[in-house]
Amino acid sequence: METAATALMAEEQQHEEEQAASLFDLGSGHHGCAHYRRRCRIRAPCCDDLFDCRHCHNESKNSMYTALLDRHDIPRHDIVKVICSLCNTEQDVQQHCVSCGVCMGKYFCAKCKFFDDDVSKKQYHCDECGICRTGGKENFFHCTVCGCCYSNSMKNTHKCVEGAMHHNCPVCLEFLFDTMKDINVLPCGHTIHLACLREMEQHYRYSCPICSKSIFNMTDLWNKLDQQIAKTPMPEMYKDKMVWILCNDCNANCNVHFNIVAHKCQNCSSYNTRQIREAPGSSCASRAAETVR
């Protein structure tokens, strides 16, 4: 009798596991939006409208067709109601539907009220950031100065900038902290969308839009400029003209000979410089007047 009862219990347990597995995958990949695959929609607490995700809400409520005073972003942590995509039951935020039992997101974060069926992204919640991120928690560390998660490969090499991720991209002006686009951390520590950085490169812009420091290894270009300057002697009235320059790379002030092509920093050999003033007594205007007399 005990053997039969044990076998019956094992059979029931197997049936329950199979049913749970079926509900875990039921409808997976067939619901959601362009941003996430998920089996639920959210009710926005700010405007009481239904959307597939917070990005869908923000795109709709901040479009050019929305009155300026009505534009807003959804407060993601304030979401309290979701609607199952399979049975349309509205309920409190939870991973499994209270009505049909389906799993509404294989990845679920109760803190962020976030659902996603695509677990290949390796989502994880960062308590310091206060939001979910992708890539696997084991591959990232949270920098308390920069205020964001960075790749472990940058742990001992990146330059800290306070709140580096808590501002808009300097090119497209999209807020970087919770963007879905790839981000690049520049050598100076400032951050920018990777796509925006590539667009800058296509337009021959090789300095940080925020601090003007070089963002690539410019040695080859500096060598070419050395050759170009050697081939471009200044006219007699400019030959002894001196100017003060500020180096954007090392912040040094240097007094150098004027050249129409570029000015080289005497401290770090960078040509990423700007003229700040003329040296006293080196005005070409005064020498031109002497030539006329």
Image (cartoon, rainbow, N blue to C red):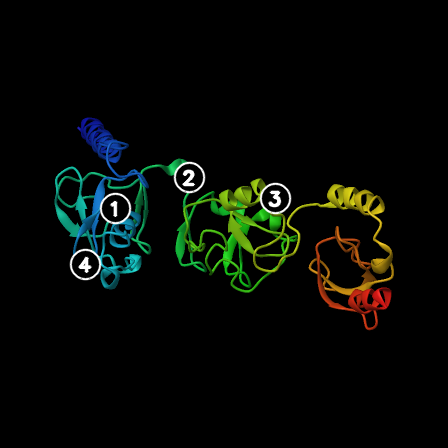
Q: Quadrant of the C terminus?
A: bottom right
Image location of residue 167, percent across then percent down: 47, 60
Q: Nearer the viewer, residue 34 or 25?
A: 34
| Residue 189 image position (x, y, % from top left) | 60, 56
Mark 4 vs mark 3: in front: 3
Return the disc, 2 or 3, that comes first in the chain's sequence. Answer: 2
Disc 4 to disc 2, C-alpha distance: 30 Å
Residue that badge 3 annotates: 204
Q: Earlier in the sequence, mark 4 or mark 2?
A: 4
Residue at 21% x, 59% y: name it: 45
**Which residue position holds label 2?**
121
User: In terms of depth relative to the viewer, which is nearer, 225 or 78?
Assistant: 225
On-image quarter of the N terminus: top left
Q: Amino acid at mark 2?
A: Lys
Q: Closer to the camera: disc 4 or disc 2? A: 4
The Cα atoms of the two marked residues, 1 and 3, are separated by 48 Å
User: Which image quadrant is residue 101 in?
Assistant: top left
Distance CA(mark 1)–CA(mark 2): 18 Å
Residue depth check, mark 1 versus mark 4: number of the one nearer the observer: 4
Tag of residue 214: none
Q: Residues within 10 Å of mark 2 (few under 14, many from 20)?
A: few
Farthest bottom residue in view:
280
The mark that comes first in sequence, 4 or 3, is 4
Q: Which residue is mark 1?
A: 95
Query: Which residue is outermost to the front?
Result: 293
As helix, strand or loop, the secondary structure at mark 1 comes to: loop
**Callout 3: SS:** loop
Which residue carries the number 4 mark? 47
Q: Nearer the viewer, mark 1 or mark 3?
A: 3
Left or right? Give the position of 17 relative to 254: left
Q: How would you rate the neighbour count of disc 3 (Cα within 10 Å): few for under 14, some for 14-19, many for 20 or more?
A: few
Q: Amino acid at mark 4?
A: Cys
